[in-house]
Image: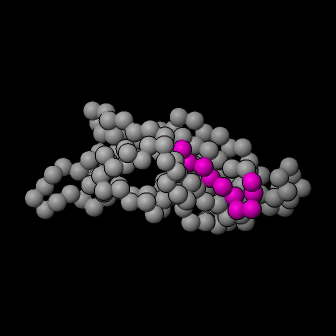
């Protein structure tokens, strides 16, 4: 994990690849839970028998499920100390060049593409690339936007991080 003492130090990492998260298992159970939560019950996600004869040879994870893994992957890759809060601000661009088969393992890689100060805080663009173990091409490339707000100075010291 890459640790930054401050938003200024994180800003200094613009252009750098910060590393990778741990590998995560994509299970049919997690895909089914996502399908139930979102109402996306398409057979390519939730019907292993039918999907076995479909275009992907089995069930696949939802693209939006993949996006839902990004915050945990980012927290595993880097932390910024002296930050009061960090919130998802949006996405600039997202692509799903390859499906993620159920049963695969995935991990995320992070590269800081820009950080700029705004009246609300520091707006960071981080390109997240989701890889499938054993596959050459990425399953997802997402330009994420996060707003980080510096912790106020206090007598006890600033919160420990995001």
Q: Position of residue 31 (x, y in %)?
A: 66, 59
Pick whichever, 156 or 28, lies toward us.
Answer: 156
Q: Is residue 86 above or below residue 133?
A: above
The residue sitting at the left extreme is: 155
Picture quadrant of residue 78: bottom left
Choose between 65 and 40: the one closer to the eye: 65
Residue 151: tell me if it is visible: yes
* Residue appearing at x 57%, y 35% in the figure: 93
Residue shown at 13% from the left, 55% from the top: 154
Res 124 → quadrant:
top left
Q: Quadrant of the C terminus?
A: bottom left
Q: Main secondary structure of the magenta part?
A: strand
Numbered label tally:
0
Residue 8: image x %, image y %? 31, 46
Quarter of the picture containing the N terminus is: bottom left
- The residue lying toward the viewer, choosing from 139 and 88, is 139
Q: Is 160 on the left or on the right of 17, as rendered?
A: left
> Looking at the image, is 110 positioned above or below residue 29?
above
Region in magenta: 126-136
- Give the residue displayed 74% in from the left and 54% down from the top: 136
Of 60 and 94, the residue lying toward us: 94
**In the displayed structure, does residue 158 sit left or right of residue 86?**
left
Residue at the outermost right position: 53
Instruction: Give x and y (percent) for residue 43.
Output: 77, 52
Instruction: Using residue 66 as the reference point, say whether residue 100 is left or right of it.
Output: right
Q: State the image coordinates of residue 45 (x, y, percent, origin top left).
A: 73, 54
From the viewer's perspective, is 40 left or right of 11? right
Residue drawn at the location 61% of the way across and 60% of the way down:
107
Relative to 30, residue 100 above or below: above
Q: In the image, is residue 150 part of the stretch drawn in magenta?
A: no
């Amino acid at each position: 994990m890459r640790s930054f003492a401050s938003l200024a130090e994180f800003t200094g990492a613009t252009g750098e690849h910060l590393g990778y998260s741990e590998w995560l298992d994509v299970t049919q159970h997690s895909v089914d839970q996502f399908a139930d939560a979102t109402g996306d019950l398409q057979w390519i996600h939730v019907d292993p028998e039918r999907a076995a004869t479909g275009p992907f040879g089995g069930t696949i994870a939802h693209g939006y499920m993949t996006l839902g893994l990004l915050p945990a992957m980012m927290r595993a890759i880097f932390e910024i100390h002296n930050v009061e809060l960090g919130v998802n601000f949006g996405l600039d661009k997202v692509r799903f060049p390859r499906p993620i088969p159920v049963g695969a393992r995935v991990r995320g890689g992070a590269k800081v593409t820009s950080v700029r100060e705004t009246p609300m805080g520091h707006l960071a663009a981080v390109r997240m690339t989701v890889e499938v173990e054993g596959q050459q091409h990425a399953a997802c490339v997402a330009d994420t936007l996060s707003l980080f707000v510096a912790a106020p100075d206090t007598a006890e010291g600033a919160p420990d991080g995001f």
